[in-house]
Image (cartoon, rainbow, N blue to C red):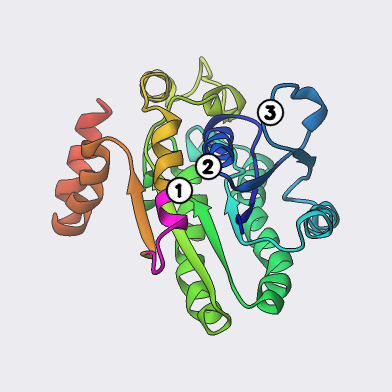
Amino acid sequence: MSKTVLITGGSSGIGKAIGEYLSKRGYQVYGTSRNPNRISSSVFPLLKMDVNDTESIEDVISEIIDRSKRIDVVINNAGVGITGPIEETPESEIKKAFQTNFYGPINVIKAIMPHMREQGGGHILNITSIAGYMGLPYRGIYSATKAALEITIEAMRMETLQFGVKMTNIAPGDFATNIAAGRYHSPVLDDSPYKRDYGNTLKMMDEHVDNGGDPLEMAKVVHKIIETPNPKIHYKVGAPLQKFSIVLKRVLPDRVYERLLLKHYGLK
């Protein structure tokens, strides 16, 4: 029997690529979007859901179970980007980023756990970020949201193994998606002491996304993980240098690693 998969944020980018890839391989895929009516070309059903609205989460889960009787895999992919000097980033935008990137996936997990426990198991995959392994200049809030999710899932995985529910974190590097268009940018202010460095870093970040990998690579990794009987806790997907940056942070002295980041971003 084919597995039933729920993907949050399935209307574009990585979520869409994963949904299309799994659909072609016989999975029953359901995606979610805050505005599914705006999407006319999805190859799998898109249901209206906001990860910040617990009632909409419950409604979507109930609808899928009514249709397919169970949910075998949940892919927490919905997220938002945010950039800017932390000093100049509005508190309201910081809270919004945490609301979607951290509290959102936790809301979905809380809602699906009783169903997975009742059916005797399931698999929850969380799309985090390589940025969550390090504090990146002018992307510190985004890094923090993903780091918080990584650590929380490490703990939650140990709590849920007794029920046969597996949890996996998948940290992508830069992929060619529309995340840059939808993220919050603190404005580059003319009178800001960060104007030059932030402006240059913002251009570099946008270039990295534009020149990023094909989201199909993420889809293939997700498929492989779903079909793995005992998946690892953490996976990293991206360019070799991006993945190697995590290794360097683990082995290098803090100040040496900091100097490498400063040089990479042209900040010193």
Identify the element where label 2 is drawn: loop
Q: Amino acid at mark 1?
A: His
N-terminal of the two: label 3 or label 1? 3
Q: Which residues are magenta?
A: 222-231
- Which residue appears farthest toward the front when viewing the image? 1
Check residue 35 for magenta coloring: no
Q: Is residue 124 left or right of residue 238?
A: right
Q: Nearer the viewer, mark 1 or mark 2?
A: 2
Helix, strand or loop under label 1: helix
Is 77 placed above or below 250 here?
Answer: above
Label pair 3/1, CB-CB below 8 angstroms? no
What is the C-alpha distance between the residues marked 3 and 1? 19 Å
Question: What residue lies at 69% left-to-right and 36% top-to-bottom?
Answer: 44
Q: CA distance from mark 2 to mark 3?
A: 16 Å
Contact between labelled residues 3 and 2, with CB atoms less than 8 Å apart: no
Q: Is residue 103 above or below residue 41?
A: below
